[in-house]
Amino acid sequence: MNHFNVAAGILCDSDGRILIAERLGGGPFHGLWEFPGGKIGANESSVQALSRELAEELGIEITTCAPFMNLRHEYDDRIVTIEFFIVSDWNSDPVGREGQALRWVPRERLDAEELLPADVPVVDALKQQH
């Protein structure tokens, strides 16, 4: 079974809202929402991968981020280990550079049912922060 290491960013704005991105492409998770990010390359640190992915997906440059939580999720066809980071400062406004929709959602309104299965524990942890 394939195993992927992923870095994902939880962008928090000054109003306490969190950015989620619509998942594009085929597959079972099309139309669900996720925290933006992607696979960590062979010669990258997780922060380097996060910076690269968010520049590619959202057109932003991270200036401040901190580790939040790590989790492992087993799908039917793959295992994913995800390192989540709270991204509290960046330059420019995030845009869906790959055509994906973006939404800013108040932390308490995050709905686990709309998000990827692997992201559900993160929603619970974020809600417990307040």
Image (tube, rainbow, N blue to C red):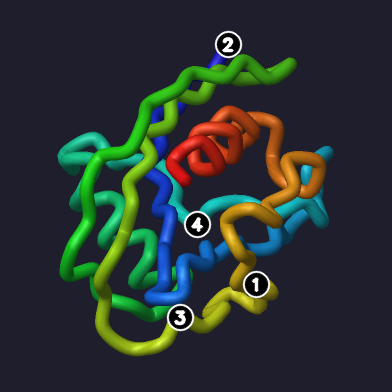
Residue 3 percent across, percent down from the top left: 48, 19
Q: Rounded to the nearest whole Å, what is the CA distance between mark 3 and mark 1?
A: 10 Å
Count neighbours of disc 2 (C-alpha within 10 A) and say few if under 14, some if 14 to 19, many if 20 or more.
Answer: few
Q: Quadrant of residue 55?
A: bottom left
Which numbered disc flags the more N-terminal residue, 4 or 1?
4
For the residues labelled 2 and 1, say whether their Cβ atoms are less than 8 Å apart. Answer: no
Q: Of the residues shown, which amino acid type is indicated by label 2?
A: Met
Residue 94, numbered label = 3
**In the structure shown, which secondary structural element does the residue marked by tag 1 occupy?**
strand
Q: Which residue is mark 4?
A: 36
User: Which residue is identified by label 2?
Assistant: 1
Closer mark to the observer between disc 3 and disc 1: 1
Amino acid on which disc 3 is placed: Pro
Q: Position of residue 73 (x, y in %)?
A: 57, 19
Type of the residue with mark 4: Pro
Q: Is residue 43 left or right of residue 121?
A: left
Q: Are marks 3 and 1 in contact (CB under 8 Å)?
A: no
Residue 123, percent across and down?
59, 40
Which residue is depicted at the point 29% across and 41% down?
41
- Report crowding for label 3: few under 14, some 14 to 19, many 20 or more residues within 10 A (C-alpha): some
**First-in-chain label (4 vs 3):** 4
Residue contact at pointers 2 and 4, CB within 8 angstroms: no
Which residue occupies 64% across, 33% down?
A: 120
Q: In the rendering, which numbered label is found on residue 103?
A: 1
Tell me whether circle 4 and circle 1 mark residues in contact (CB < 8 Å). no
Left or right, 91 with respect to 55, comes to left
* C-alpha distance separating marks 4 and 3: 11 Å
Q: Which kind of residue does numbered mark 1 sit on? A: Arg
Q: Residue furthest top?
A: 1
User: Which residue is pictured at 53% across the width and 80% down the height?
Assistant: 97
**Which is closer to the viewer, label 2 or label 1?**
1
Q: In the picture, which quadrant includes the N terminus?
A: top right
